[in-house]
Amino acid sequence: MSPDSSHSDSLQRFIFENSPVRGNIVRLNQTFNTALQHQNCPPALRKALGELMAAAALLAATLKMQGALVLQIQGNGALKLLVVECTAELTLRATAKWTENLIKDDLADTDFADSNFAELVGDGQFVITLDPKDGGQGYQGIVQLEGNSIAEVLQNYMQRSEQIETRIWLACDNQTAAGMLLQKLPDFQSTDLPEQDADLWERTGYLANTMRQDELLHVPAEDLLLRLFHEETVRLFDAQPVKFHCTCSRTSVGSMLRLLGAPEVTDILEDNGDVEVHCDFCNAAYVFDKVDVEQLFSADIMMPSTNSKH
Ligand SMILES: [Zn+2]
């Protein structure tokens, strides 16, 4: 195990030669820590958010998409909201909201996220959004949360809604988040397959289930695949870099303030002297003073109704 490999965040695709089974492996260290550095996230939620980040990268890599994939878990337990966005370029950002006073001791326990996911979330929903980011038609799916872990929730969703056989393994040790995905392509022509490969999908799933969390987190992808699937012919592709990037901007915050409306924003301005907005994802501060706010709503001043006064 080389310590360096666990610190360069990357996603690696692989295929089982001449078969409908493909997969990818992702490992996030710097990306995970950068995304969470401004959020004083309790350990149990840190783990859940890390796993959701790994999952978002794994799924984004399987989609032929532009724009961004957004995964959300909404709950009414201690966990209120987890949001992870992964772009087609494999940049990630993430944020969490939680209730401090609910099962507070449990939130300090990283193992709690594994054993009591249902309790952590309560009654919840899983929301998956494909945002093309070009103004085109997006996609949103909302389902009841079903499963005892983030991996199970996603697996159930993929099975029911996308009808692609998908298996996902996730792990997060509070410093590194990692995941592996296996997928069986539904439209593969299986006529050329050798007989012994009929159960390849079951076999690979069974073998991957023997993987320990620390292996998923720390063993280099090449060694891990060899360890798990040494009797199969696996082709591993070059690693693609994954990194943290927040897409917030002064323009987008300005648009949000315009949506809020002039009366509301003017109230904030009068109470505080200026309007300060912090990005939920990266904590960047955007400050709008009196002049900025006037400029923001200056389009309204130019409206005919205002001009007709003289
Ligand atoms: Zn931001």
Image: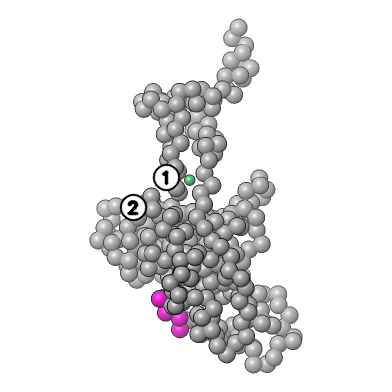
Q: Which residue is mark 2?
A: 40
Seen in the image, is 170 located left or right of residue 233?
left
Picture disc at residue 283: 1
The kind of residue tagged 2 is Asn
The numbered mark, 1 or 2, whose residue comes first in the sequence reads 2
Cα distance in 3D space between marks 1 and 2 = 12 Å
> Is the stretch drawn in magenta largely helix, strand or loop?
loop
Task: Place residue 270 in its image quadrant.
Answer: top left
SS category of the residue bearing label 2: loop
Please say whether residue 264 is visible from this viewpoint: no
Would you identify the image quadrant in which residue 192 lies? bottom right
Residue at the spot x=69%, y=91% of the render?
194
Q: Position of residue 54 (x, y in %)?
A: 49, 65
> Which residue type carries mark 1?
Asn
| Looking at the image, residue 88 lies above or below residue 271 | below
**Quarter occupied by the C terminus:** top right
Crowding around mark 1 (Cα neighbors within 10 Å: few <14, some 14 to 19, many 20+) is some
The percent position of residue 65, horizontal first and vertical second, equals 65, 58
Q: Is residue 129 visible?
A: yes
Number of dots carrying numbers: 2
Q: Quadrant of residue 82?
A: bottom left
Left/right placement of residue 91 relative to residue 42 reads right
**How many other residues sit within 10 Å of disc 2, few (<14), some (14-19) or many (≥20)?**
few
Q: Quadrant of the N terminus?
A: bottom left
Task: Respond yes or no on whether mark 1 lies under 8 Å from ligand 1.
Answer: yes
- State if disc 2 and disc 1 touch (CB < 8 Å): no
Q: Which residues are magenta?
A: 210-214
Colouring convention used in this rendered image of the protein: one colour
Taking the spot 54% from the left edge, 78% from the top edge, the residue there is 222
